[in-house]
Image: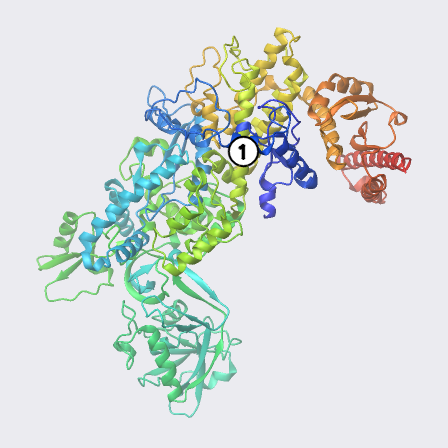
Amino acid sequence: MSAQDQKVAPPPDLLPAEQANPAEGAAAATAPGSSAPAVAAAEGGKETSKNAAKKEAKRLEKLAQKAAKGPTVAQGPKKDKAEKKEKKAEAPVEEWVNTTPAGEKKDVSGNLPSGYDPIQVEAAHYEWWNAKGFFKPQYKSDGQPLDKGTFSITFPPPNITGNLHIGHALTIAIQDAMVRWKRMQGYTVLFLPGYDHAGIATQAVVEQRLIKTEGHSRHHYGREKFLEKVWDWKDQYQAKITTQMTRLGGSFDWDRVAFTMSDSLSKAVRETFCTMHEKGLLYRANRLVNWCVYLNTSLSNLEVDQLALTGRTLLNVKGYDAKEKFEFGVITSFAYPIENSDEKIIIATTRPETMLGDTAIAVHPDDTRYKHLHGKFAIHPFNGRKIPIITDAITVDMEFGTGAVKITPAHDPNDFECGQRNNLEFISLMNDDGTYNENAAPFQGMKRFHVRNEVIKALKEKGLFIEQNDNEMQIPICSRSGDVVEQIIKPQWWVSCKPMAEEALKRTRAGELEIKPKTSAADWIRWMENMQDWCISRQLWWGHRCPAYLIKFDGEVPDTADDKNWIVARDLEEAEAKAKERANGRKYTLEQDEDVLDTWFSSGLFPFSTMGWPDKTADMEHFYPNTIMETGWDILFFWVARMVFFGNTLTGKMPFKEVYCHPMVRDAYGRKMSKSLGNVIDPIDVITGQVLQKLHNDLRMGNLPEKEIVKAEEGQKKLFPKGIPQCGTDALRFTLCNYTSGGRDINMDIGRVEGYRKFCNKLWNATKFCLFRMDLVDLNGVRQQSTFVPNASPLPTGQEGLVEKWLFQKLNLATAAVNNALEARDFAEATSAAYQYFLNDLCDVFIEATKPLFEADTSASTKLSAQNTLYTCLEGGLKLLHPFMPYVTEDLWQRLPRRQGDKCESIMVSSFPEYISQQEFPEAAAEFDTVVECIKAARSIVGLYNLPTNGKTIEDKITVIVQVKTQQQRKLLESQEPIIIGLTKGCGTAKFISDDSEVPKGCGTEFVTADINVHIPVAGKVNASAEIDKLQKKEALAQSGKNKIVKLTEQPNYESAVKEEIRNQNSEKLNNLEVEIETLRLSIERFKSLL
């Protein structure tokens, strides 16, 4: 597990005490990714005392992962194996069935189930939320947004190519957390869902499926029939994706759902194409493009992967015989003969077949080796073409290789620029199908990599071949087909990006757009400063047809690369009107461009096309610009940049005020998720659980070849040997948000999700116990008649005791921490703050500490005060967790009684906690924190010395001795004696002393403050010599810290050069270290007396 993972996991401050009822006896579980213990309730409350003892032993072996576990039932006599087997064979647990009619509210008025079941908890809530209209924006009576303002997010539209993966789940978890938070804060919130038609990706996957299932490519069906099949696919997979989005709890406004090829969004696409062309920002040109031979289309840079090779490698190439392999990772050197000379010039290339299109040999103007060849010619060995030797300081590094570079302007981006600078001839060699054309004579008609082999063979025959060497390099691979990508010249539609990038950069620097985290902001600036034009033509059938019409006058053959021969229009009627005017009486025909637009063209309009643009709508008025765009950092350039370009150009505004880039989700080993590795995770499998065989079966539902399926199955066996455990939506969402701390990668560990499932069980059992404290249920969750009704106001009444004031202060601090973290988009901190409050403060401390307040002899007013504090702080904790864990918090909140006059129907539309000054009790909180620190010190000694915690008598139980030097603090700690005993596992007695002379010999000691130490007698229970060694090491460490501070303070200019604040801090540290050293010295002496 990475350091980042450990950093973001929220560790609790305290270990749970051993307790004797189902709610308080929470099973301990180490917080995933943390070395500190976390608490989660025993699922179902069925752990036996024997299991608890085993886990206790394991805990004591692994002190770095302390996880105290209390028995959930009182210890009884041991049962023999026969009895156990007989009990195990009793009636099987019936599978729970949801009987709530769709869209109706789930009835939770009955008894509470014994433990947390995510399937049962999550049932019915989503449908009811949606039916009630809670997902829709709320307005004032006049139709205007609420006074707090608006908060809008357009969900990055997933491709309809297949199911959502765990990266999409991360997007939903983060975005929906913000959406639910802002909705609860009283904003008019729009969370708009949508889907992307994903041109090349969808066409490729549908065609591959047709080949696999029906044995035919798209050409067998023709364009119209094939598109019908794609629309069928779209409907099928959009429905599947929608199911996933709802299961993940995304509170989308489904009445506004968008699809990039819907009528309204298609209208926006046509308007954009025409407007951009009218502005001179969209043009026709014959330029280099990425070309996939197998798919017969140009590609965006995003659709090109780079295969790294360290040297000579034999590879299969798509479209060739499977047994045929071609050599990559080598550099071939050969010679060109110089015209009218016996001299030759040697060049080197990784693509020898492209020498057929060489139109120059470039050398550096300052290279003395070739000055005599400037202006001369080499002769092409296969066609006799004269090849000029030119000078180009930009292209040539004279220290690299021979210092002479072959220039093939029609098949290499660097050579293309060199060709333009030097006015070279552009010779295109390759047909769209990957065969070489007549310009490649005598190799015309051959496939490109066959040409490579034949060229090398022919060079050898002519004596021009020099050598081949291993060459570390990258091969461009089509991410959709796996084919080797070529660079070819084609007439295409292009968008001029540089002026839009300059405007985007200007506005970003003016503060109109904020990009988080800072690493992504730096990437943004770099990309904007180095922007290239964007090819938007795709040779596909699925997508938006370019709204451009080639005008053909009778008797003329138009140049398709010339912009002047095209009519750009919003529809055919407009095109005919423009053509008629241009023709001026001449006969003509119009042919619409067969190409479609790059998918990013339509998705780049998403923030405003979904709001009704180009029409003026209420949504455009209220929700545009969007508040935030949250997406992966890997598409910051490909998608976010295009949205900014289009937004500024077409609407005059940045499309959003903020961009937050979340990390990329990798597997537990840090590998990028890939179907062939078997590490792609369907979030539904994490929610519901999945057996390994079903994971294997799902692989065969896709288009992977058998060889890749076998490899993927092995990967699944390694990652999920026992399948994927059922974790539930809440645990998955919470984990994903908790992972998000500003880094660029997440190493996804299912074990961590499983750990937070246990936390959900803790929420369940703790809430059940709170309801018991309110007299609403018994310890088994059975509903009881109760007179308790929470106060109409959540504010303190003035009757609260110390621990109640402490909890109010903790709720205030947690509330501030969660709100501040969410404002800062620090989701790891937000989840940690909510988690620690509920787990540590409410469950581990308050519930145990208030036991005396619920004793029979407690006054009614004291008990009622504790009940109201418990209610307020429990509800507050559930609300803090709701944005991350919507289902379990809703289910539990619905089981709480309502305050008088509270008509709120759902936790998701209740008010999010805010910092309340009336709940400030800093002094009381500081006092009780001292008590908590003493408890932590006592627990530390118990764990450190491996003390038994199962004593039956007072003599066998642990005695905690609190040494306090001030009377005020001693009085405070004595008043909390029951809490110290209750929260220290195995403790039977607490004593309070002042002088060192009162400390018994043979005590384990922990330093708390300069005035407080905690001791526990361990004589006879530990190895005194070993303990002395431990204490001496601690003493040496403390002495080292002291020496560093002393050395610092003894510097001549210390008083003048160091700020007073720092000097005071150093003085305090020094004092504490001196007290700690003295405490350790005394402890050593006491242990020595035992020898």
Q: Is residue 625 visible?
A: no
What residue is disc 1 on? 85
Q: Give the residue drawn at x 36%, y 56%.
A: 704
Residue type, numbered disc 1: Lys
Q: Nearer the viewer, residue 560 or 854?
A: 854
- Residue 474 vs residue 263: left or right? right
Residue 224 at x, y percent in the picture:
18, 52
Check the image and report above or below for 239 versus 949.
Answer: below
Q: Residue furthest front?
A: 82
- Residue 914 vs residue 572: left or right? right
Quadrant in which the C terminus appears: top right
Q: Nearer the viewer, residue 938 or 311?
A: 938
Q: Quadrant of residue 260?
A: top left
Check the image and report above or below for 178 versus 697.
Answer: above
Q: Considering the numbered disc 1 on the image, is that residue within a helix, a strand or a loop?
A: helix
Q: Is residue 564 visible?
A: yes
Q: Nearer the viewer, residue 917 or 43?
A: 43
- Residue 454 vs residue 1004: left or right? left
Q: Give the residue drawn at x 36%, y 52%.
A: 700
* Figure coloring: rainbow
Q: Nearer the viewer, residue 658 or 90?
A: 90
Q: Quadrant of residue 424?
A: bottom left
Residue 1034 at x, y percent in the picture:
81, 41
Mark 1 burial class by Cα count in 10 Å: few <14, some 14-19, many 20+: few
Residue 1016 at x, y percent in the picture:
80, 29
Q: Quadrant of residue 484?
A: bottom left
